[in-house]
Image (cartoon, rainbow, N blue to C red):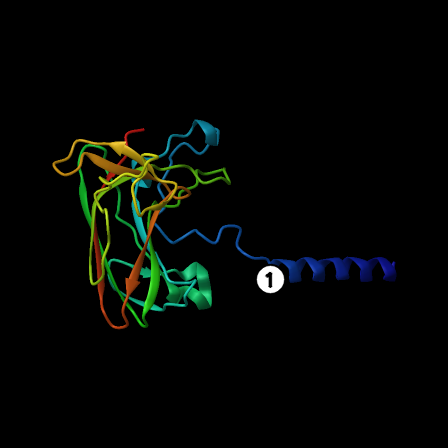
Amino acid sequence: MKKLMVIVAAMGFAVGVYAQTAKPADAAKIAAPAAKVDDKSAPAANIPIPESAYRARIDVDGMPGKIAMKPVKNCNEADWMKDDKIYRMTSDSGPLKDTEWKAFEISFTPEKDGNVSLVLMGQYFVKPGEKAISPTWVLFDDVKVTGTELKNGNFSELDDKGKPKLWGGSGELVDVKNPDSGKAIRVWHNQGATQLLAVKAGQTVTVTAKVQKAKQ
């Protein structure tokens, strides 16, 4: 009986240690307002994505070059990165509609010279009862930057494969009705669009864009 009690106690200790040392399953989750779903009894696959989940997100990633940044307007440090949170800014546009464009703006100040990645994406959202992230597609257009140079912010210049020049990532180019280029980039959390920005220490950078929920 004493041996059995020792074994059980050891197993309990091991489980406790694992629970304390286990890492979050998804480091990309941020503290964005979660959309409410009233019907908790319905299977997750049958629950529609609520309108409030369709949000644009602009991130700025300075981690590769250890470019620390300070938030100035409408952005925050990426808390999920813990001690490295100063190397990434993140933001939230608020809920979007597919019938109108919304102005979206963030500002940050880098603490040293170097290159950072501007990331256009959708917000993180998981349906109740599911583990996988749901694709909440949004559109970006008319992206502009002050404090450094951004190129092809209206996605009008295309390469020989029909992709927007100078933009990386896996965002999808789509035709839209707008007074500029008639093009926009369609993205979600796991399928964004990126461009490198050269920044200077102490020089505040402001990013503006027009954003909209993509028609599903």
Q: Quarter of the image containing the C terminus?
A: top left
Residue 107 seen in render:
yes
- Say left or right for 182 vs 189: left
Q: Name the residue located 27 percent from the left edge and 32 percent from the top edge.
A: 174
Q: Position of residue 159 (x, y in %)?
A: 31, 39
Q: Position of residue 158 (x, y in %)?
A: 27, 38
| Image quadrant assignment for residue 80 | bottom left
- Say left or right for 179 vs 63: left
Q: Name the residue located 52 percent from the left edge and 54 percent from the top edge.
A: 24
Q: Name the residue located 46 percent from the left edge and 29 percent from the top edge.
A: 45
Q: Quarter of the image containing the N terminus?
A: bottom right
Graded by Cα atoms within 10 Å as few (under 14), some (14 to 19) or many (20 or more), the crowding at tag 1 reads few
Q: Position of residue 133 (x, y in %)?
A: 45, 40
Q: Name the residue located 24 percent from the left edge and 58 percent from the top edge.
A: 74
Vertical comparison of 170 with 75: above or below? above
Where does label 1 land, which residue? Answer: 20
Judge by depth and name the residue closer to the eye, 146 or 87: 146
Judge by depth and name the residue closer to the eye, 175 or 89: 175
Vertical comparison of 209 with 201: above or below? above
Residue 42 seen in render:
no
Q: Position of residue 213 (x, y in %)?
A: 26, 36
Q: Amino acid at mark 1?
A: Gln
